[in-house]
Image (cartoon, rainbow, N blue to C red):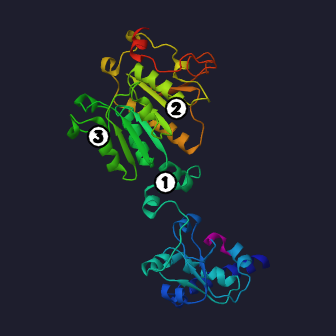
């Protein structure tokens, strides 16, 4: 063995002994009362996310992994008394050997950590928009850099309007509520029927005969009390669409099951400048896209005229595989969350086609039509029309 290797081995052994001695020397712990009364520098060795929730005023923040590199620069005086703290006192105790190795002469750990400090009623500060309960509920979002605390706060301030609480609205509503969308509107005038339960997972047998909007409100509030649920027990019409859309909605999730409502919603969303996440289903096939005013095509660009009734039967006439709306509604919720967070590539100008039998997802480009009568360069439709007559007349 060479001399360098021998010295390295001895050094590692010395550090191991130092750690072993230090981590069993409980005389190097002080109580929260003593830490609060003394004049030592409090050093918070927790992560950035933990500190945002609550920290001791005036404490220095040096995450445990950065102590060796940053503490000498931040605290050059090696005679400065230091009290380290973390959540419950474990990490702050383990870091003491590292602080010793840096040459500091007086360092101890606060037993019980910031929890003990708070239990005694001592003051703390917070940089977080989320309280402890919300941080626990949305913890998996907070771990994602593209979401994080800022994104979760944005979701809690977002308002989304769902057209329909049926097959598509059910999974969309559940996942949006679970994700913490702060305000969800439900537009539906129907009642829960036993034939709905094969696919409309918002509702249950105990709710048969109940208004779907009310049933949905109960389910969403049970799932997440952070969410405000606004219900409209009415069908979307030319008479009420402006009133409903003017109530501060950031985007719309379209789960309508008929063409008059889809065309009405399209025109209204353009005039109110609200993005629409569109979805539709039939038997084993579904489709999803995003219509964002002034940035891509609209529903009329995709379908300038409604197809004749014999080419577009409803689910009540042709059936639908129960799981299909779960897939499509979840894709709609995904697009809605991306739009709210401003992340990823929304399906603007792209029609996603899902074939449940083939387990295949295809994509078709949708160009914006400059001659579109509503979103085109020279629109010819500037007010609501009789959408039932429009759809039946083609």
Disc 2 or 3, which lies upstream in sequence? 3
Q: Are marks 2 and 3 in contact (CB under 8 Å)?
A: no
Numbered label attached to residue 140: 1
Nearer the observer: mark 2 or 3; the answer is: 2
Numbered label attached to residue 272: 2
Q: Residues within 10 Å of mark 3 (few under 14, many from 20)?
A: many
| Span of residues in magenta | 63-67
Residue matched to label 3: 214
333 falls in the magenta region: no
Disc 1 or 2, which lies upstream in sequence? 1
In the picture, measured across the screen, residue 295 lies left or right of residue 187, that is: right
Q: Residue at x 39, y 48 (%)?
A: 228
Q: Are marks 1 and 2 in contact (CB under 8 Å)?
A: no
Front one among 311 and 209: 209
Nearer the observer: mark 1 or 2; the answer is: 2
Q: Position of residue 217 (x, y in %)?
A: 32, 43
Disc 3 or 1, which lies upstream in sequence? 1
Q: Secondary structure at mark 3?
A: helix
Q: Secondary structure at mark 2?
A: helix
């Amino acid at each position: 063995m060479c001399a360098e290797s021998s010295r390295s081995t001895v050094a590692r052994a010395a550090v191991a002994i130092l750690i072993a001695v230090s981590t069993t020397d409980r005389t190097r712990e002080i109580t929260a009362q003593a830490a609060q009364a003394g004049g030592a520098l409090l050093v918070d060795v927790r992560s950035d996310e933990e500190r945002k929730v609550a920290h001791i005023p005036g404490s220095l923040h040096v995450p445990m992994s950065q102590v060796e590199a940053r503490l000498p620069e931040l605290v050059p005086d090696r005679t400065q008394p230091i009290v380290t703290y973390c959540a419950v006192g474990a990490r702050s105790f383990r870091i003491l050997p590292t602080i010793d190795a840096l040459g500091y002469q007086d360092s101890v750990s606060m037993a019980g950590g910031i929890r003990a400090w708070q239990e005694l009623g001592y003051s703390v500060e917070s940089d977080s928009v989320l309280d402890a309960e919300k941080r626990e509920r949305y913890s998996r979002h907070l771990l994602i850099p593209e979401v994080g605390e800022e994104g979760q706060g944005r979701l809690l301030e977002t308002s989304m309007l769902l057209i329909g609480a049926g097959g598509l609205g059910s999974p969309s509503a559940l996942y949006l509520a679970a994700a913490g969308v702060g305000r969800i509107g439900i537009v539906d005038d129907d009642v829960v029927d036993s034939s709905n339960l094969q696919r409309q997972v918002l509702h249950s047998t105990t709710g048969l005969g109940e208004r779907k909007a009310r049933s949905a409100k109960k389910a969403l509030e049970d799932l997440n009390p952070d969410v405000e649920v606004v219900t409209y027990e009415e069908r979307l019409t030319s008479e009420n669409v402006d009133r409903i859309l003017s109530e501060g909605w950031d985007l719309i999730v379209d789960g309508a099951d008929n063409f008059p409502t889809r065309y009405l919603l399209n025109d209204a969303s353009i005039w109110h400048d609200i993005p629409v996440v569109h979805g539709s289903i039939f038997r084993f096939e579904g489709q999803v896209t995003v219509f964002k005013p002034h940035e891509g095509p609209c529903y009329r660009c995709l379908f300038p005229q409604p197809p004749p009734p014999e080419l577009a039967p409803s689910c009540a006439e042709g059936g639908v595989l129960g799981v299909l709306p779960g897939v499509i509604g979840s894709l709609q919720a995904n697009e809605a969350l991306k739009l709210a967070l401003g992340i990823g590539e929304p399906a603007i100008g792209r029609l996603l086609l899902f074939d449940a039998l083939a387990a295949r997802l295809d994509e078709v480009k949708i160009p914006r039509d400059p001659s579109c009568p509503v979103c085109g360069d020279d629109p010819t439709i500037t007010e609501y029309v009789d959408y039932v007559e429009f759809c039946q007349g083609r």
